[in-house]
Amino acid sequence: MVDPAVAEPPSSGTKRARLELVPPSTRSDPVAPAAAPGEQFKAPRPLRAAMLVLALLPIPAALWAASLLPETAALGFGVFVVSLSLIQAGVDALDLKRSRRLGDDLLRAHPARPPISALAAWRAGELTAARNRRELARWAHRLGRQLETCLSLRTPRVDTAVAVASLVLVRRLETRLELLTEPVSPIGMLAVDALARAGLAPLSYPERAGELPTALVQVLTALEQR
């Protein structure tokens, strides 16, 4: 079995991975306050925010039923409440996206240290949560199926040695993510997510398949960072 710490692409024609999956620690640090003892970051919850606003909907209906509000006014009130809930959900969704981006930057800036702020600690917990691990394990499983297909069809644009090495590594990655009793590093989960978004699927982008072995070694190593 290929050792992820030392495995290299088996073919001399294999390209070197061009992905910055594990950013260097020399990047400039984002400005963020250190976490106070016991401090917790409360992440935006778009769906909950929308539901809280929608809880006002029975009010115009009740006023109309009690003949205290004309039908058109009650309808307008209802439309306003629905519109307000959508706006609130959109604002919270943008805030959540910004929070995740800043949390990622903080984790990348301090890869060998515990989270330096409540925001970074929240993001680290979200990245390493069982739900996220299972989701990325499913992606790894699909990638493995594509590699198996390439091997069974002997896809001419994908080097067989590269496909075999990639399949061994991606199965190891899938198993590592599914083993929930063993912790993984947040920076490693960021690396896996970056790889999942990088478009290295051998069936869709066979010209980039040569990058897979090195990229998979990188993410497997990053998962073990402490």
Image (tube, rainbow, N blue to C red):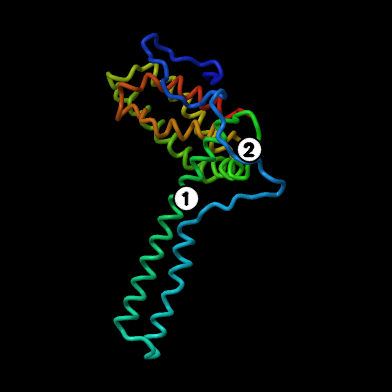
Residue linked to disc 1: 95
Give x and y (percent) for residue 25.
Answer: 57, 24
Secondary structure beneath disc 2?
A: loop
At x 63%, y 28%, the residue is 112
* Identity, as a three-letter code, of the amino acid under mark 2: Pro
At x 61%, y 42%, the residue is 121
Give the Cα separation between the discs numbered 2 and 1. 20 Å
Disc assigned to residue 115? 2
**For residue 177, side relative to residue 54 (left or right):** right
At x 33%, y 71%, the residue is 79
- The image quadrant of residue 32 is top right
Q: Nearer the viewer, residue 160 or 31?
A: 31
Give x and y (percent) for residue 190.
Answer: 51, 34
Q: Residue furthest left?
A: 156
The answer to whether the residue labelled 2 contacts the one labelled 1, judged by CB atoms less than 8 Å apart, is no
- The image quadrant of residue 69 is bottom left
Residue 58 to residue 218: above or below:
below
Secondary structure beneath disc 1?
A: helix
Q: How many marks?
A: 2
Q: Nearer the viewer, residue 23 or 138?
A: 23
**For residue 79, side relative to residue 10 (left or right):** left
